[in-house]
Amino acid sequence: MAESPFPDSANANKRRNFRRLLAFFLALLVLAVAAGGWWLWRVYRADSLWKKAGGAIERGEFLEGLGFLGWYLALKPQDLEGLFLAARTARRAGKMQEAKQLLTRYEDMGGSLQSVRLERDLLLVQQGLIGGADLRLRAMVGPDHPDVTLVLEALARGYMLTERWADARQACSMWRNVDPKAPMAWFWGGWVCERMVQVELAVDFYTKALELAPENREVRIAFARMQLRKRSPETARPHYEWVLQRYPEDEEGLLGLGQCLMEEGKVMEAIAQLDRALAMYPQSNLALALRGRASMEVGEPKQAETWLRGAFQAEPGDGENLHQLVQSLRAQGKNEEAGQLDQKLTDLQKDLKRLNELLRMIGPQLADSGPCYEAGIIALRVGRKEQGRNLLEDALRRKGDHRPVHQALAGYYRESGELEKAEVQEALAEKR
């Protein structure tokens, strides 16, 4: 057999073809490894985000949980369980429009209609649109229902929003019975007790909530606020500092720390803290009131008057602000105006005392509309407009003569510029 006239060239071609084939297979292998690695990373990332979302939701940090779920759905957009949890978490975070959009997307992708119906009722109730939704939920969801805690949570929120304190207290109590380790059941229970002027019980509830959720900002703030109310700034201060370490511009944290410094006698430090808060939140009634009080502490009643008058005009039903304003006027020799405001303070204190007595009386079992009506009138008179309206609406759900209730609501709506609603209430008053 004749030898190739170009043996070296033929061998070179074979080697070149082999190298090309080897490079091709190596490239395929690299692509396969990369694709596998990318897939594994996505699986790991999605699993990690799901766990982080669950942890945040369990702590009551719903906005944080919703953020993790958003990233999760970017990786797994067709995951029905993730979509529904995101819709539910958005509702619990107060992001109602986002919750509705996610719920619609879940439904369009074939999600459970029963779950959708339940969640839509929870959306209504949590926004204070109670209507018949709370009755449907109470009838449909028993203590053994898997979503009973979520239903009780939404009911508690809706009742709190409409200032139906006794109903809210009952919902929180049932929630704690079903799940005693739910921090928000204790927290909101304390919040309701605070509004019903049950201070010691509120402290107990906030203490338990803090034990269950030490990383929750709202719980820290509420616990610290009650410690200040008990004149214990040394107990409150570490909690405000904890909040500010994580959220340096937090309004309640800044003002709470300023109040602690004032209670501890560190007035100049308090003034610096309050001036910083006012620079960020110039419309804050509490900041104005505290700054006025601090000016009184350092012997500047004229400056104090400016701050305190602004706080009083914004919130005329705050007895402490009014008392401080009277003191600043007396210190300047403005005795005539001080005397007039002092009489107003006496009347306000009587009203607030009676209002607190009535709030303790009002419970879910109270049939008579009278206490709700009287409390609503007092609340309106002292400038607590929303509370007054809510109490009057609560009176309509109870037995009694509703004509004065409709008349009071008509007056409220006229003053608020809602003339159509005022006319409706006037017409109802005439029919009675």
Image (cartoon, helix red, strand yellow):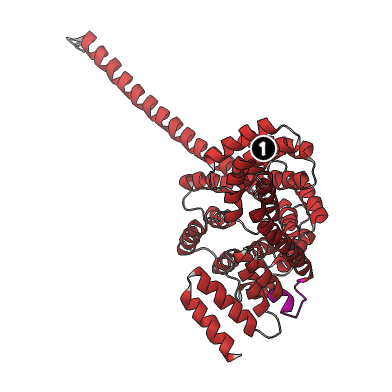
Residue 103 spot, x, y in % from top left: 50, 61
Instruction: Inspect the magenta stretch and tell me whether residue 398 lies in it.
Output: no
The answer to which quarter of the image holds residue 84 is bottom right
Q: Indicate the position of residue 408 as horizontal and vertical percent values.
A: 60, 77
Q: Quadrant of the N terminus?
A: top left
Q: Position of residue 280 (x, y in %)?
A: 53, 40
Three-letter code for the amino acid on which mark 1 is drawn: Gly
Image height check: is 108 above or below 279?
below
- Looking at the image, how many numbered discs can be counted on the residues? 1
Q: Which residue is mark 1?
A: 258
Q: Residues within 10 Å of mark 1 (few under 14, many from 20)?
A: many
* Residue at x 58% of width, y 65% of height: 115
Instruction: Give the residue drawn at x 75%, y 38%.
Output: 263
Q: Is residue 247 visible?
A: no
Quarter occupied by the C terminus: bottom right
305 or 17: which is nearer to us?
A: 305
Q: Position of residue 155 (x, y in %)?
A: 66, 65
Q: Which residues are magenta?
A: 362-373
Indicate whether 383 appears above or below 233: below
Depth order, front residue of 334/48? 334
